[in-house]
Image (cartoon, grey):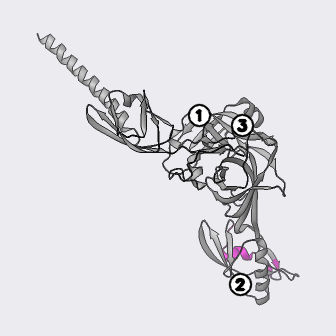
Amino acid sequence: MKKLWFKRLSASLFLVIVLFFGIKYHLFSCLTMPNETILFVGDQLEIPKGVRENTAIEVSAHSVLEKAKTKWTAKREGQTDMLLSIGGFPIKKMSVRVLSDFTVIPGGQSIGIRMHTKGVLVVGFHTVQTSKGRVSPAEQSGIRIGDTITHINGSRVEKMEDLRPFIVESGQNGQALFLTVLRKNEQVKCKLQPVQEKNQSQFKMGLYIRDRAAGIGTLTFYHPTTMKYGALGHMISDVDTGEPILVESGEIVRSTVNSIQRGKEGTPGEKLASFQSQATKIGEVQKNTPYGVYGELTEGMKNHIIDKGIPIALSAQVHKGKAQILTVVENEKVEAFDVEIVRSIPQKNAATKGLVLKIVDERLLKKTGGIVQGMSGSPIIQDGKLIGAVTHVFVNDPTMGYGVHVEWMLKEAGIDIYGNKASIRLETAS
């Protein structure tokens, strides 16, 4: 009798334990679902197996979602709540927002970038030989390499030629110059006294300066309705100071890849590309940000691989697995190459380096050794959607690199996908 009672007790305890851990598993699966999910019309939301089993899923009668087996399809623009319950008890409420379908045209073209700085960039110091010995007036004034001179004596400075009249006037009246410089986005005041060079009539500040910059990169996308574009996926910095270029104006032109310097461990490779000084402008540069270069095109562009608008994927929709990049490795021909998404970080707020990718295409590995300089901005496409752009290479492993989610590039371009101001189905580029 006691043995029978013990067996029943043991069986009951075992059943309780099984039920407890089963419920705990489903409970945990429900609680780890996001509080909010954003989809585009036509996207599918697949409920994980741990949530589907023993979980009741309720949506409003006029939901923007339509169920089909284990997936829910976004049918129209709007918002709804999805309630998850276990055993009749509500566990989790998830907000689902559906945006109007949105497409952009992917790039891949090699572009040349010419920019004029906002003010005059200080890139170095030099000493001046005077009758009293060598001095460095700029260093003594407190100016630092990387500063941008924006005003002298209250007057705006836009280019290097603007400094000469102030230097001449200072030499004539002997008065110091009062400079306003931008340093790490802060205004700093400096007082600088130009000095006369020995046996010369000229006065000098002891500065090396620059008012323009140029480089090579890759176009990521453009939006034909507004002609807004995004490129590079990262900020352009001055080659000498490492400081970000503050853009006053600029333009992009078509460029040609002449050859490739292959990358290897410890030494990143490079696209050796060029563009003519008189090359026709195809777009304006308006912004240089941590997420790339942005502006408006003056004409549509074709890569002859995908010349129609394709959907985009938000950061939460990107997954590990196969993908492709579009880029140029010879002349101006855009080609598609296989890559693998190794890691994707769902991001609620704008951030760089949200993707890690690996080059797996043997053709590209043979040609470049992996990701090379000049490839920044190459669009990444997964499941027929634009998900981001290549931005950086791993120095110790050129077959791998970082990417930025296209969601943040669109935001920097001034394209409001959430407010649906740019949510228009696009036609083929002309």
Residue at the extreme bottom of the image, as rendered? 173
The amino acid beneath tag 3 is Ile
Q: Name the residue under label 2.
A: 176
Q: Is residue 241 left or right of residue 23?
A: right
Q: Tell me which label, 3 or 1, sits earlier in the chain.
A: 3
Q: 10 Å neighbourhood of mark 3: few (<14), some, or many (≥20)?
A: some
Q: Is residue 424 left or right of residue 143?
A: left
Dot 2: element? loop
Q: Name the residue under label 3.
A: 305
The amino acid beneath tag 2 is Ala
Q: Which of marks 3 and 1 is in front?
A: 3
Residue 112, image x, y percentages:
76, 52
Image quadrant holding the N terminus, namely top left
Dot 3: element? loop
Residue 328 lies in the magenta-colored region: no
Residue 340 image-quadrant placement = top right
Residue 317, image x, y percentages:
52, 39
Q: Tell me which label, 3 or 2, sits earlier in the chain.
A: 2
Residue 76 makes an appearance in the image: yes
